[in-house]
Image (cartoon, rainbow, N blue to C red):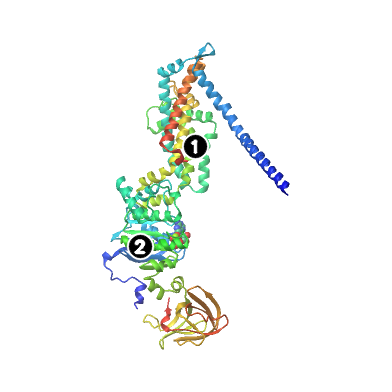
Amino acid sequence: MTTSSTRSEPATETASDVAVAVDGLRKEFGQLTAVDGVSFTIRDGEFFTLVGPSGCGKTTLLRMLAGLEDETDGSISIDGADMTAVPAEKRPTSMVFQDLALFPFKNVFENLTFGLKMQGESKSVRRERAEEMLDVLDLQGYADNEIEELSGGEQQRIALGRSLLTEPDLLLLDEPLSSLDVKLRKEMQLELRRIHDDLESTFFYVTHDQEVALTASDRIGVMNDGKLVQVGTPREVYEEPATPFVAEFIGDTNLFEGEIDEADGTTVETDSGLEIVAADRDDIPDSGRGFVSVRPERITVSESSVDADNSFEGTVADRIYQGDDITYEVTVGDVRLQAEQPAADGDDLLARGDTVGVGFDRESAYVITE
Amino acid sequence: MGVNTETGGEATGFSQRLRSVSKRTRGALVALPPVAYLTLFFAIPILTILSFSVRVQQNLQMTNELTLDHYATVLTSETFRGALFYSVRVAVITTAIALVVGLPVSYYLALKADDRFRNMLLFLVIAPLWINFFVRSYAMIQLGSPQGFINGFLLSLGVIGEPLRWLVYSQPAVIFGLASLYLPLMVLPLYAMLRQLDEAWLEAAQDLGAGPLRVHREVTLSAALPGMILGGLFVFLLSLGNQAVPRILGGAKNTTYSESILLQLEGSVAWGTAAAASGVMMAFVVLVLVGVFYVFDMEELF
Ligand SMILES: Nc1ncnc2c1ncn2[C@@H]1O[C@H](COP(=O)(O)OP(=O)(O)O)[C@@H](O)[C@H]1O
Ligand SMILES: [Mg+2]
């Protein structure tokens, strides 16, 4: 496993692979630092997702990429060209705004082809391109409708189409699905991925919904409090979180703080009194404070004691049935562990108050030293 | 039981009828004041004027004999045609100036001014509507007269060698007076429309490739259009009919259309001609309105 590669970008990418390079980007609003020294690259044709809690600076970062906000410091280059002095209207980017920003005084056709009109395309060309786009968006025959006649999901698609028709090198999407209900959001998300794959363009997608990030993206960046905490594939970020924040924000986890001891393999003496044997890695210091993260689905719960590197005895405190799986909350001493089991072999469900064995292997215990 | 239901049914039917009747009566009662108002102050005067315009006048009496002579007189009269051109020209220029001044002012008010400042500015913009018109006009004359402040200032700076005489009692003075009088009627509808403008639209337009001027043409002007039309109609029609401003600020050279009508009434006591001239003006105004409503689909605008 190449753990370190998830923390900072390797310098091995050739210039032609890189669609976007951001270096030391900062934005201050008076006293407040909204974006705090962010560096990353996006590869050509990549579906890159930025996740982070609301207020962490995602929109501000996106607006700087689009040229709608001046950076306080740092640089942005797109397709190898420095963007510092390039105004928004001249950048090869297009943004799908969080609240869409469709023009209510223009109809669907005029909204869709606004960018083409600015590029000086003739009306007949615009008609043709609009029809093609409406096909892609599955909105055939809507060209002459007014914007307010469309449903939320339809407006969403028009906003996407309006940006796509300008054929941007980089499409910026600011939580474009957040206003939709869950079912439609899931549909639109697959749709987005399909459109991305069809067009082979570069998508920079921003969301506070980590589920979206994990399913649709080639790589994700996790942002917190203005800083980019980690960049990697969804799997890397999930399996090898760089900070306790990432471990807890992406998926559920059991997180313990404690003292690291590298004398004999890697063990962590947690403050809550457990001794956890963890996966060994070169970059773990010999001693000092650290965290250990164990994903609930990696923990086995059983009526008898569990044969694993880490094995404890506990009591079932709670049981949450979720259809395809069951989450047990097991108390071990003062510690509450969450363990997720597939529900299929669950005829003999464990009950509240049962004494059980819980356990997990050292590979499932990931040490975080930040 | 059966009897009970029957009488119950009858009662319901009756009370329903009663209610529907009273509803109709109530409707009529509600409509009565506006209908009465419009009839009294709008329909009757207009119909009177129109009937005067097609009747022969004998001394100070309108006879019942019909004629089109009054219209012929008005339409062939050099004076009336000149006055109409003058009035329309003044109204058009006034409207254009009100638009050019009103757009940036209302844009600033609606989108740039912070809340406290905005209220103060709105108050100032509306000021012409409540500061006495004559006071303002005479103040303007004081400022613009050859011995007035403006000329004095420009002379002392050496910008001009002798006083500018066209600052008062001239067509520019009339236009300036009208524009400043009616500017609020342009600014208020524009402001109302631009308050609804979302700055994200400006950003979206820019993001899609529109430069600064294009953004305003495509977004700001589109959003302001209904306000421009409403404000434009207000200013144009009121400027066209205004008599006081040209009387106070205008020179002796030009006579407005309204003034020409007044001269017919007061000078020649030619009621028929005056009525026909009014009819021509009404026809012109209706034509303008129909034209505007035809070009800009009203349903779309409001
Ligand atoms: N124009 C602005 N002026 C002042 N503060 C701002 C402005 N825009 C954003 N902020 C602040 O910057 C921080 C990051 O905001 P934002 O980028 O919108 O976060 P996110 O999109 O992740 O929710 C927030 O604390 C927000 O209040
Ligand atoms: Mg945001």
Q: Any atom of ligand 1 within 8 Å of the CB at mark 1?
A: no
- Check disc 1 and report its element: helix, strand or loop: helix
For the question of whether residue A52 can be seen, the reply is yes
Which residue is drawn at the image coordinates 45% and 49% (left, top)?
Answer: A149
Report the residue that reaches farthest toward the front.
Answer: B2
Q: Position of residue A85 (x, y in %)?
A: 32, 55
Question: Which quadrant of the structure image shows residue A5?
Answer: bottom left
For the question of whether residue B148 can be seen, the reply is no
Which residue is drawn at the image coordinates 57% and 27% (left, top)?
Answer: B39
Question: Which quadrant of the structure image shows residue B221?
Answer: top left
Q: Position of residue A48 (x, y in %)?
A: 36, 65
Tell me if A242 is positioned left or right of B53 in this view.
left
Q: Any atom of ligand 2 within 8 Å of the CB at mark 2?
A: no
Between marks 2 and 1 in the image, the one whose residue lies nearer the viewer: 2
Specify the quadrant that holds the C terminus of chain A. Answer: bottom left
For the residues labelled 2 and 1, the Cα–Cα distance comes to 54 Å
Q: Which residue is mark 2?
A: A194
Q: Chain of mark 2?
A: A
Tell me if B194 is positioned left or right of B1 in this view.
left
Q: Position of residue A243 (x, y in %)?
A: 43, 74
Q: Which residue is mark 1?
A: B184
Q: Position of residue B84 (x, y in %)?
A: 42, 23
Specify the quadrant that holds the N terminus of chain A. Answer: bottom left
Type of residue at label 2?
A: Arg
Quarter of the rendered image showing ligand 1: bottom left
Type of residue at label 1?
A: Pro
Identify which residue, B259 or A75, lies in the foreground. Answer: B259
Which residue is drawn at the image coordinates 47% and 60% (left, top)?
Answer: A181
Check disc 2: other Cα within 10 Å, few if <14, some if 14-19, many if 20+: few
